[in-house]
Image (cartoon, grey):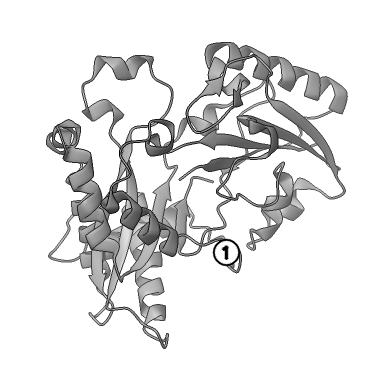
């Protein structure tokens, strides 16, 4: 799956002079690209990036409202307008640009930096044999990832609420400790499963796919010189007709993530390991209601200080159906 990963960083009171702020951001971006030079190039085809130092694209926009007018809205559809492109379509944008940045200047002096960064699946950059299994997996994945007619909602949980939620969820026999992400995801996924029961075309099984970073678990020296992620999806399942038990749901999520350990990473790296994993993934999500879950909890995004303090809020903007995205506020 190829496309651009959207990211938004909000800074309050950061801009006294838009021109100076943009110049500062451009210089910072230029310095960053010297360390990650492929992102300054252009995609030629599915096989290579031309590292021609063409640079990233930088756009400026004036927003005729205060930043709080955006942040106080629980409807997140307006956030897309702060990105360089409206839709995060699963295709390359014109010209093969790897990174596009948009600086949005609010009337109050706040700044929102919208970033689109290209990402590619290894199968498209290093295409293996076009096996029937891979075609089947692509088809199954495409059927579960849809863009367009979806509604995005933002739910804000303060620290006391999360503490209460975690205490409530772990008060059961299946799990005696949960992370913030597991607790919040269990609540939202459980509610979504309950909603699925009302559909006419209800499916028997619900599957949660949770990307897990495997880079530090693979113990491969070559990865130290590579740009990008090494990740695979943990799989949690819950029957649609089963009584919603948030303790058990959180336990399912926890167990799925814990299975993605060093032993799993070594097996994935063995001959045929990746294809076997794709086969299992395809079987798990076939004819199931799939939810995608990801989290930026404890992400270093809140360390992104350009000289006017850390972000007031950092988030992504995903317009996939059945997508749960967790981040700090």
The mark total stands at 1
Evaluate whether residue 177 shows in this view.
no
Q: Residue at x 45, y 35 (%)?
A: 299
Q: Could you tell me residue 82's position as x and y percent?
A: 72, 45
Q: Could you tell me residue 38's position as x and y percent?
A: 54, 19
Q: Quadrant of residue 271?
A: top left
Rendered position, 256 above or below 50: below
Q: Could you tell me residue 298's position as x and y percent?
A: 42, 37
Local crowd at mark 1 within 10 Å, few (<14), some, or many (≥20)? Answer: few
Left/right placement of residue 39 relative to residue 67 reads left
Q: Could you tell me residue 100's position as x and y percent?
A: 67, 32
Rendered position, 36 above or below 318: above
Rendered position, 325 above or below 129: below
Q: Residue at x 64, y 63 (%)?
A: 75
Q: Nearer the viewer, residue 161 or 246?
A: 246
Left/right placement of residue 17 relative to residue 321 reads right
Q: Secondary structure at mark 1?
A: loop
Evaluate whether residue 294 shows in this view.
yes
Q: Quadrant of residue 269?
A: top left
Q: Nearer the viewer, residue 241 or 124?
A: 124
Rendered position, 140 above or below 228: below
Q: Quadrant of the N terminus?
A: top left
| Residue linked to disc 1 | 153
Left/right placement of residue 21 relative to residue 96 reads right
Q: Residue at x 60, y 29 (%)?
A: 98
Q: Nearer the viewer, residue 327 or 260?
A: 260
């Amino acid at each position: 799956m190829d496309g651009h990963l959207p990211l938004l960083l909000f800074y309050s009171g950061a801009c006294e002079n838009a021109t100076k702020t943009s110049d500062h951001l451009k210089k910072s971006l230029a310095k960053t690209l010297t360390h990650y030079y492929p992102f300054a190039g252009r995609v030629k085809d599915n096989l290579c990036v031309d590292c021609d130092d063409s640079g990233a694209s930088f756009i400026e926009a004036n927003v005729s409202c205060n930043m709080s007018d955006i942040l106080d809205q629980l409807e997140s559809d307006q956030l897309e307008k702060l990105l360089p492109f409206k839709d995060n379509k699963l295709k390359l944008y014109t010209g093969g640009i790897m990174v596009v940045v948009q600086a949005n200047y609010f009337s109050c002096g706040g700044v929102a930096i919208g970033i689109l960064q290209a990402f590619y699946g290894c199968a498209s950059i290093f295409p293996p044999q076009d096996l029937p299994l891979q075609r089947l997996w692509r088809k199954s994945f495409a059927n579960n990832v849809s863009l367009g007619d979806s509604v995005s909602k933002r739910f804000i949980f303060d620290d006391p609420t999360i503490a209460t939620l975690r205490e409530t969820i772990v008060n059961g026999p299946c799990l005696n400790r949960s992370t913030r992400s597991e607790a919040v995801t269990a609540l939202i996924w459980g509610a979504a499963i309950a909603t699925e029961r009302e559909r006419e075309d209800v499916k028997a099984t619900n599957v949660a796919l949770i990307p897990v970073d495997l880079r530090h678990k693979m113990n491969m020296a070559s990865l130290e010189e590579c740009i990008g992620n090494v990740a695979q999806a943990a799989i949690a399942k819950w029957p649609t007709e089963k009584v919603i038990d948030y303790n058990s749901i959180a336990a399912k999520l926890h167990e799925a993530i814990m299975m993605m350990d060093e032993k799993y990473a070594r097996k994935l790296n063995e001959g045929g390991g990746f294809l076997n994993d794709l086969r299992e993934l395809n079987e798990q999500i076939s004819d199931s209601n799939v939810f995608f879950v990801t989290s930026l909890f404890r992400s270093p995004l809140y360390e992104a200080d350009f000289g006017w303090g850390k972000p007031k809020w950092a988030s992504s903007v995903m317009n996939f159906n059945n997508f749960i995205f967790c981040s700090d506020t």
